[in-house]
Amino acid sequence: VTTSVDTLTTIMNAYGLSADTATSISDKLIQVQNKGKTTVSELGQSLGQVIPTAAAYGVNLDNVSAAYVAMTKNGVRTSEATTYLNGMINELGKSGTKASDILKEKTGKSFKECMESGMSFADVLGYVIEGGRIRRGAWRHVRKCPCRSCGNEHCGKWWQGVHKSSESHVQRGRIHGD
């Protein structure tokens, strides 16, 4: 119960939400559990590590939720998904990284500006993915491809999967199946 309350208050505080949104937030966490391969308890232990970063860059809870669904559904543990998601958000958000430079080149906007303009996380990943491949070095925080099938650095398969899966789970800021 303590983890659930901590998770809810972390989310509400980071996004500036009122207490009357608690039920909606709880419902979203249950949807992530049902559509991904995780539990609300695992999410509770991990979300507090990514929510402040996501909120700072304008990544809403629906986009965070869709990313967790995409990653856990594809076999990435919740704790690892948190690390990857934090890394992706930071790489996209920090000025001067390859990922942020690609995004700026493609959209003329920073990551935060893209998110604030209503783009989904999947939309942003789509701009960074070029010709079905991730530009080498765009995700420098990844030492080994987490798709686990190739062991090759930056193969792009896994990131494409996150993009496609996130895109199918998020539409106009809502998780499909709401």
Image (cartoon, rainbow, N blue to C red):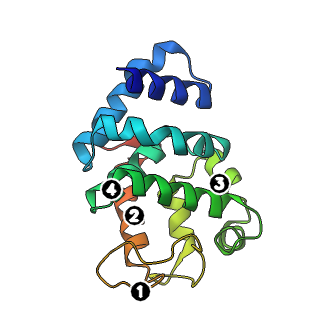
Estimate how packed mark 3 is, as few (under 14), some (14 to 19) or many (20 or more) residues with alpha carbons within 10 Å.
many
The answer to whether the residues at label 1 and label 3 have Cβ atoms under 8 Å apart is no
Kindly identify which numbered label has been placed on residue 152: 1
- Of marks 1 and 4, which one's residue comes earlier in the chain? 4
Where, by quadrant of the figure, is residue 71 drawn?
A: bottom left
**Image-based side of 117 in relation to 73, left or right:** right
Give the amino acid type for the residue marked by disc 1 in the picture: Asn
Q: Is residue 164 above or below residue 130?
A: above
Measured as percent of width and height from the top left, residue 109 is found at 72, 60
- Residue under the point 64% across and 64% down: 91
Kindly identify which numbered label has been placed on residue 77: 4
**Image-based side of 155 in relation to 17, left or right:** left
Instruction: Compute the Cα span from label 3 to label 2.
Output: 18 Å
Name the residue beneath numbered marker 3.
114
Q: Secondary structure at mark 3?
A: helix
Where, by quadrant of the figure, is residue 175 drawn?
A: top left
Give the amino acid type for the residue marked by disc 3 in the picture: Cys
- Of marks 2 and 1, which one's residue comes earlier in the chain? 1
- Of marks 3 and 2, which one's residue comes earlier in the chain? 3
Name the residue beneath numbered marker 2.
162
Residue 64: tell me if it is visible.
Answer: yes
Instruction: Compute the Cα span from label 1 to label 4.
Output: 19 Å
Where, by quadrant of the figure, is residue 41 drawn?
A: top left
